[in-house]
Amino acid sequence: MATTEIKNICCIGAGYVGGPTMAVIADRCPSIQVNVVDLNESRINAWNHPDLNQLPIYEPGLDAVVARARGRNLHYSTKIELAIENADMVFISVNTPTKIRGVGAGKASDLRWVEACARQVAKSSKGHTIVVEKSTLPVRTAEVIKAILSSAESAPKGTNNPKSFEVLSNPEFLAEGTAINDLENPDRVLIGGESKKAVEALANIYEQWVPKEKILLTNLWSSELSKLTANAFLAQRISSINSISALCEVTGADVGEVSLAIGRDSRIGSKFLKSGPGFGGSCFKKDILNLAYLCRHFGLPEVAEYWENVVKLNSWQQERIARLVIHKLFGTVAGKKIALLGFAFKANTNDTRESPAIKIAKDLIEEGAELAIYDPKVNSEQIKISLSIDEYKLDDNQASRNESFSDIGKWYVASNIGQSLQGADAALIITEWEEFSRLKWEDLAPLMRQPAWVFDTRAIVDVSAIKKAGIKVWRLGDGAE
Ligand code: NAD
Ligand code: UGA
């Protein structure tokens, strides 16, 4: 049986996954034409922007990969039908957020975009097409996709070229901020499917740069479920260490030391044991809620509850940080200026989806604080969308803190760290950007209003240097304060 050779790929969805993943496939497989399509025209325009600094996603190394392949065998466009028509293989890489209304609201995945893709493929494809689930999906979604596609599996009138389909699951495990390295050197590539020929066709693509032993082949349902399970396990580790961070603070232990000590046990391992303000990002919460929803659906409420607690602990961690800041600032932040350093959900990305900064900022604004937000990669428009609160416009003579400010909570973007700290009562570090760990607090202290605080939720500052600069400091998970 000869393997199907893939010459033309279409990827529906030019987001954080579709964009970089297809760029790497095109880079590593110059003989395959890769067309990434999206309904969002401005996103596609940004992918095609001649200035690589204007790509819609910030990922270290992405610009170089796009520069090598774009225009050669990597194309970004809004011509969805045409791209599907020409493709031997179609990746579905669209968003699968949590449903906000109807049955399963707040828990189940909203599959309307995936379903729309399946219908579009059923309509526009020609001949045999391998459809690959790249989005993260509830286990057994392939069944739905197959049902939609099979309705089109008959020869269009007057032709002898019937449409036919195979469905594969090929979840993506990249993390934002390290996406290019994760794609170029993955721990594993997972392919689930029923047709050996289709599975081999996809495996052959990855084999162009991934060692064969790292390509795992499973059945469809194991592949779909492994993706949700991987995210649930990763998030569970973060909630576990965050729960211990709170215990460290009241007992005199240091969570960094505890992480180091337990991580040396090879059965536990050292990764994903960094306590912080709670996990953010577009996927952990939605994927765990979806896993729990599936468990309830299949009559396993105890299993659902077990995983739901991982999300509960995460929300608690975010809430306790805002409460702690208020407590340390004499019980009120009304009219006080706080420099919020970092808004992205982690360093090296401009993504703010589910960032812990959102909940913490909203709680502080609600209490009347004035937040001067500084993030090296997140702009004010993005912050406005995330907070659903308009930015307060400073006029020229309010560039630094003004005692006459009312105590109605507000936020604005500071153009640099110095401006954010001017007259501030506190700096609150939310994202672990490298530049925040190198701040010269002895130079910055005079800008702040005394008594000033640094609240470090990522444990990246040098506590003794801050204390020496005359600033009080609180570090998450550090009971030695
Ligand atoms: P995203 O929102 O950044 O991108 C999805 C894109 O799909 C959007 O640009 C949207 O316009 C487009 N789209 C939606 N419906 C469409 C349609 N019918 N036709 C054409 N375009 C359409 O999402 P993302 O972060 O890339 O995530 C995509 C999937 O991958 C999700 O299921 C997510 O859970 C999963 N995932 C994400 C990450 C990550 O790091 N972001 C990692 C692994 C897996
Ligand atoms: C995560 C997974 O790591 C990827 O494997 C997966 O593909 C992806 O979700 C997805 O399905 O979307 P991502 O959310 O991009 O990737 O980033 P992570 O590095 O996992 O960080 C998630 C959150 O956990 C961040 O807010 C981060 O600051 C936090 N985190 C991470 C910690 O608080 N401590 C840690 O030790 C690690």
Image (cartoon, grey):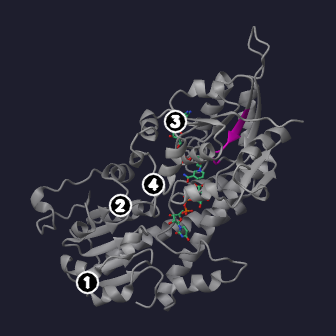
Q: Position of residue 340 (x, y in %)?
A: 32, 67
Q: CA distance from mark 2 to mark 4?
A: 12 Å
Q: Which residue is mark 2?
A: 376
Q: Which residue is mark 3?
A: 71
Residue at 59% of width from left, 24% of height from top? Answer: 82
Left or right of residue 465, residue 220 in this image: right
Earlier in the chain: of badge 3 and badge 1, it is 3
What is the three-letter code of the residue carrying label 3? Answer: Gly
Give the magenta part as a residue range.
130-136
Q: Position of residue 131 (x, y in %)?
A: 71, 36
* Mark 4 CB within 8 Å of ligand 1: yes
Residue 441, visible in the rendered structure: yes
What is the three-letter code of the residue carrying label 2? Answer: Pro
Frontmost of labels 3 and 4 is 3
Which secondary structure, mark 4? loop
Residue at 55% of width from left, 48% of height from top? Answer: 20
Q: Which residue is mark 4?
A: 351
Which secondary structure, mark 1? helix
Specify the quadrant that holds the C terminus. bottom left
Kindly identify which numbered label has been placed on residue 442.
Answer: 1
In front: 142, or 41?
41
